[in-house]
Structure formats: C-alpha cells, structure tokens
Image: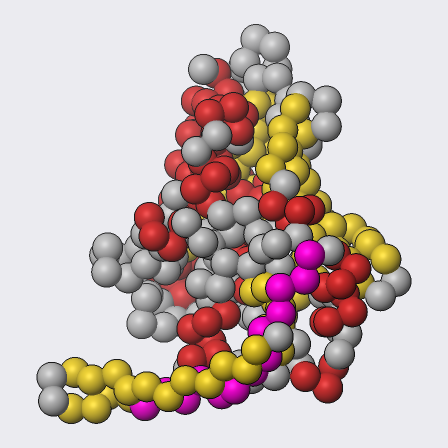
C-alpha cells in the first residue's frame, strides 16, 4: 500500500474556478477475491473499490466521497473474465472495460442492445477504462448500460464475508448512488442468459445536445417473436433517468406477450412505460416532457427490437 495526497486547482483564464484537495489514502491491489474481501472489511478505513475509476476518481477529487483506502480490483482474474457460449451465456467481470465487450464480434452479434449502450459510456478514452460493473455500482438513475442489463435478465454475483450471493440487476440499484451491496461486499461479475431464437434487443437514449452526455430519458427493450415472427412470445422493457433508479416496467412487456406485432399494441406498451415514469423537472427537461419522451422512445426501441428479431 502507498499513501497518496494531491492538491490542485482548476483555472478558467486567470480566475480560480475551484480548488480541489484529494485527501491522502492508501492504495491496494489484491490478487484474489478473498484478499479483496479482507481489505474491504477494514471498515475503519471506509474502503472503496476501483474498477475503471471513471466515476470514483472524480468523486474523490471533488470531495463527494472520502476514503482512507482505495482497493483496485483489476488484478483479480475473476473480475477480468469475458466469456460467452450458447450453453452458459455471457459472463462479464466487473472490471472488464466497455471496449473489450463491443470489440468482441460474437458478443456484439448476440447482445446488440448491450452494445448500443456500451458505446455511449463517455468517449473512446473513457470506454478503455469504464466497465458495466462500475456503471451499475455507481447506481446513477441515468446510467446508460443499466436498462439493457435489466432487459437481458442480468444477474450480479457479489462477494463478501459470507461468501458469494446473486442479485438480479433489476433489484441492484436502490436509489441514486445506493445499491444492494452490503458493508464489505463488492461486485465480482455479471451474467446474462443466451438470447432465445427470434429475439432482439435495442437501447436508445435522448440527449438535448452532444455537449450534455447524460440521458434525459433512456429506454431498453428485449423481445422474442414466434417462429413466423408475427407474434410476441416474450418482452421486457426498462427505462432510465425518469425515477430514482432505472426501472423494470414488467407490465409494459407483459401486455405484448401473445399479441400480434402491431403499432396498436406497441402504443399501449409505450403508454404503460410513460405512466410508470416518475421524473423530476431539472435543467435537462420538465417532468411532463420526460414522460412524453419515455413513450416516444419506448415505441421506437420496441420497433427496433422487433426489427432485429426479424433479421
């Protein structure tokens, strides 16, 4: 371990905009899950996990988080696993950066909705560090990769003093910045089942301009069609940035099941998603505007998922 402390200032022209003090902390790089668990259970140091660090470093720098111990988990083999096969599905270690996921042709073809989101996490440089696991643990209501992970039926594997346990991604976020992780626990990996035949997934977000890289609304849809591709066999809808957590809107997917693919039934699902949204008004848009966008995007992502299922 080594202690780190940095003082620096951010200037705009000749004026000091902000002065940041990155407080001293110890830094550890465990090689095993067991070692990481021991370090994270030294609660006297308020330890925190670093996977990609694209959120954590900013939070520490701006004093939105304080810690005496940063535990870098990128040297643990299980957290760097990226594997896919038809029998067992997709496993993504919590430290696997986005570029490795969308850079894999087989995974990209099998999980296009997840690729839609992974390519939106910051710019190219950020995608070299940021991970799905980190995006999930940051628990932002507007996290782009979370709705796609929900619609894919993702499951999180968590390690702690009592061993490992699993939590559905749809239940992982419990509020802005709050997760299902208990003291001393950390996310090891994410698992997604193999998509069924005749299925498609799609994610889309709305941002008012390129300079504002945070969703006003984000919606993901997963559908499976009948063999003749005319009827919905299953469907899952998830919405983001319109509630304290990303939401799995089960009713919106359920209304499609057993119905013929048509604009009328898609409109009904979109209305249900709109009614489930609980947005606030802020600088990105009013609550009414965001509810309207939820309906518009839900309609479009269902249509997009259906098109991919038919390809």
Task: Specify whether 182 is left or right of 146.
Answer: right
In this figure, what is the number of numbered marks? 0
Magenta stretch mostly in which secondary structure?
A: strand
Question: Quick check: 194 above or below 180?
Answer: above
Quadrant showing the N terminus: bottom right
- Say if residue 231 shows up in the picture: no
- Does the segment drawn in magenta span residue 296? no
Decide which of 304, 293 is in the foreground and name it: 304
Q: Quadrant of residue 228?
A: top right
Kindly identify the residue that appears in the image at 55 percent across and 47 percent down: 96
Kindly identify the residue that appears in the image at 62 percent across and 64 percent down: 29
* Segment colored magenta: 19-31
- Say if residue 119 shows up in the picture: yes
x and y percentages locating residue 114 in the rendered image: 50, 39
Decide which of 206, 127 is in the foreground and name it: 127
Task: Specify whether 240 is left or right of 281.
Answer: right
Residue at the extreme left: 13
Kindly identify the residue that appears in the image at 21 percent across and 91 percent down: 16
Residue at the extreme right: 162
x and y percentages locating residue 46 in the rendered image: 66, 81
Residue at the extreme front: 2
Kindly identify the residue that appears in the image at 44 percent across and 63 percent down: 54
x and y percentages locating residue 104 in the rendered image: 48, 30
Task: Specify whether 138 is left or right of 307.
Answer: right
Question: Quick check: 117 above or below 66?
Answer: above
x and y percentages locating residue 134 in the rendered image: 55, 58
């Amino acid at each position: 371990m080594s202690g780190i402390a940095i003082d620096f200032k951010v200037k705009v022209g000749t004026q000091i905009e902000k002065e940041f003090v990155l407080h001293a902390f110890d830094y550890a790089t465990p090689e095993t899950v067991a070692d990481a668990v021991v370090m994270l259970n030294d609660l006297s140091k308020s330890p925190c996990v670093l996977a990609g660090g694209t959120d954590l470093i900013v939070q520490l720098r701006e004093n939105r988080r304080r810690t005496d111990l940063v535990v870098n988990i990128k040297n643990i083999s299980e957290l760097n696993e990226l594997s896919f096969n038809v029998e067992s599905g997709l496993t993504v270690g919590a430290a696997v950066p986005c570029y490795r996921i969308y850079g894999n042709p087989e995974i990209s073809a099998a999980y296009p909705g997840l690729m839609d989101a992974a390519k939106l996490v910051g710019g190219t440089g950020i995608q070299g560090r940021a991970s799905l696991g980190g995006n999930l643990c940051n628990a932002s209501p507007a996290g782009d990769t979370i709705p796609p992970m929900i619609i894919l039926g993702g499951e999180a594997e968590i390690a702690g003093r009592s061993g490992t346990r699993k939590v559905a991604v749809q239940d992982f976020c419990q509020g802005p910045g709050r997760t299902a992780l208990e003291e001393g626990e950390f996310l090891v990996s994410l698992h997604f089942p193999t998509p069924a035949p005749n299925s498609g997934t799609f994610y889309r977000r709305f941002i008012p301009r390129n300079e504002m890289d945070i969703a006003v609304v984000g919606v993901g849809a997963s559908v499976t069609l009948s063999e003749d591709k005319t009827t919905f066999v299953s469907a899952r809808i998830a919405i983001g940035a319109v509630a304290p957590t990303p939401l799995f809107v089960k009713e919106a997917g359920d209304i499609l099941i057993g119905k013929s693919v048509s604009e009328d039934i898609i409109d009904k699902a979109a209305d249900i998603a709109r009614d489930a949204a609980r947005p606030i008004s802020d600088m990105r848009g009013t609550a009414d505007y965001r509810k309207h966008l939820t309906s518009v995007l839900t309609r479009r992502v269902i249509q997009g998922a259906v098109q991919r299922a038919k390809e």
